[in-house]
Structures are given as C-alpha cells and as structure tokens.
Amino acid sequence: MKKTIPLIVGNWKLNPVTLDDAVKLAIQVASKQKKAEVPYVSVAPPFVYLSEVGKKTKKSSVSLAAQDVYFKNIGAHTGEISILQLKDLGVEFVIIGHSERRAMGETDEDVQQKVLMTIKHRLIPIVCIGERERDEQGHFFSFVEKQIRCLAKVLSSAQMKKIVIAYEPIWAIGTGNTATADDVREMQLFIESVLTKVYDRSTAKNTRLLYGGSVKPNNAKELHEEGNMNGFLVGGASLKADDFTAIIKAVS
Ligand code: PEP
C-alpha cells in the first residue's frame, strides 16, 4: 500500500439490522468504486456479513475489513473470531482497540496481542488511539503518547511501518463534534514526533495515520487537505453510500 494514496475505511459497527441491507449497501458502495487505487477504500461490516459483503465487493476496488479479532487461533474461546478465519474470508484490514471495545474492557495488552497476531498473518491492523476529552493543559497529548509507546513496546520499527494508526478522539466519535483541521494537523505532527523519538524519522514518515471522528461529506475535504493525515476511519457516514462516496471523492 502506498502511503501517498489515502485510505478510507467505513466502520459499520453493529449495522445494518439485516443481511439484505448489508448486501445492498455493499453493492452501492462497490458500484461507485470500480477503479483501483484512488483512494484505497475498505468496509468493515459486522462479522456475520463479511462473507456476503465480500462477494459483492470482490469485483470492485473495495476491500474487506473486520471490526476486531481474537488473539488465539483455535480452541475453547466461545464467541471469538480468529485471524485465520478472517483471512480465509478475504479480509485485509482489522480494526483493533476501537474505543467502543476498550470501553467494554479491552486492555492495552489485548490490543498488543491482537496487533501481533494480525501482523503475523500478514493482515493490516488499524489500531485506534485517542483521548476521551481535551483539557486546556494539553494532558491529552501524554495520553496519546502513552498509547503509542504501549504499541512500541511490542513492535519493531519494521512492524510499526506495517500498521495503520487511527487517531480517533473519543469526544468526536458519533457526536458530530469533529476535531478541527488544525487539531488534526497538530496531532499528526505530534504522533510523528513521538514515533521519531521512540524509533526514528523513517518510521514516523512511513507509518500511516488516519483520522476518525464525525467525518462527514461537508468536512472531509478540509480535514484531509489541512489535517494532513493519510485517510479516514468513518463510522456513521459510512452507512449511507452517497455520504461515504462523497467522502471518498473529497480525498480523491
Ligand atoms: C468510528 O466509530 O470509528 C467513527 C469514527 O465514528 P463516527 O464517524 O460516526 O464518528
């Protein structure tokens, strides 16, 4: 994946309610995304729809992403999904450490293990980080730095360059309170500075960063052009094919 080409990932979360609607949405998104590579586009439906959605996106340039993975491959782990199962379905990206999963008890150690398992099987982790709230003193920067350092504890520079980091401030997710383009740009520079400190400049320059948090058709262009990240993780707006397509166009 060339970092110069933006990546737009639609996180469908626990939507839609029926397989029929999931297939319809997949067909609509795929039909608008026939040409390859500008930008890269991926959708992350609920696990139960991956197979059927994959069939509909197969002939388009839209790839398949999963919303989570377990860190073991086989055995007595009721309710879990393994990376081998995802790979078998043609999944390319795996969202890991989304704030909604962390809120349900996922720990930093879980995130580390899931990322390692995903890389080991040559899928691409999209690791979500981001502060719960912003404070005037800027403590949120230390929070973000801690999350990056936690990943860095288990990842070599070469591995870090293979993952995608999605900066998703929790206060912006699903709230309509998008970060400003300046906030996003500032965080892009900050994350790169942390990666430079922990690894080196080459790691910082080669690790893909996404922004996520209430990205909509009306703010995507400015966030992309001025925010200077390498794409978006989109929640709510990925559930309407027209909105998702408008966001894709805004970065094209
Ligand atoms: C998300 O859940 O990853 C997300 C960014 O959601 P939304 O776009 O709805 O804020």
Image (tube, helix red, strand yellow):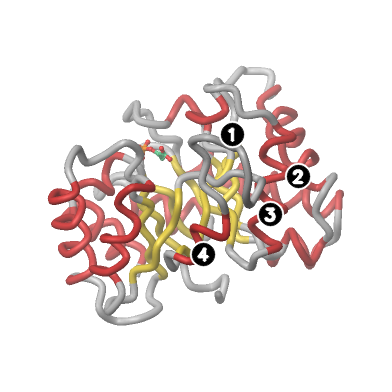
Q: Do callouts 3 and 2 mark residues in contact (Cβ within 8 Å)?
A: no
Q: Which mark is residue 92?
A: none
Give the residue at mark 4: 87
On whether ligand 1 comes within 8 Å of the CB at mark 4, the answer is no
Question: Can you say whether 83 is above or below 105 in the image?
Answer: below
Question: Can you say whether 239 is above or below 224 in the image?
Answer: above
Give the residue at mark 1: 130
Question: Can you say whether 177 is above or below 205 in the image?
Answer: above
Disc with the residue nearer the chain's start (1 vs 4): 4
Question: For the residues carrying marks 3 and 2, which lies nearer the camera in this image?
Answer: 3
Disc with the residue nearer the chain's start (3 vs 2): 3
On whether ligand 1 comes within 8 Å of the CB at mark 3, the answer is no
Kind of residue at badge 1: Gly
Disc with the residue nearer the chain's start (3 vs 4): 4
Give the residue at mark 2: 151
Question: For the residues carrying marks 3 and 1, which lies nearer the camera in this image?
Answer: 3
Q: Spatial distance from mark 3 to mark 1, Cα to Cα?
A: 22 Å
Disc with the residue nearer the chain's start (3 vs 1): 3
Q: Do callouts 2 and 4 mark residues in contact (Cβ within 8 Å)?
A: no
Q: Closer to the camera, 172 or 221?
A: 172
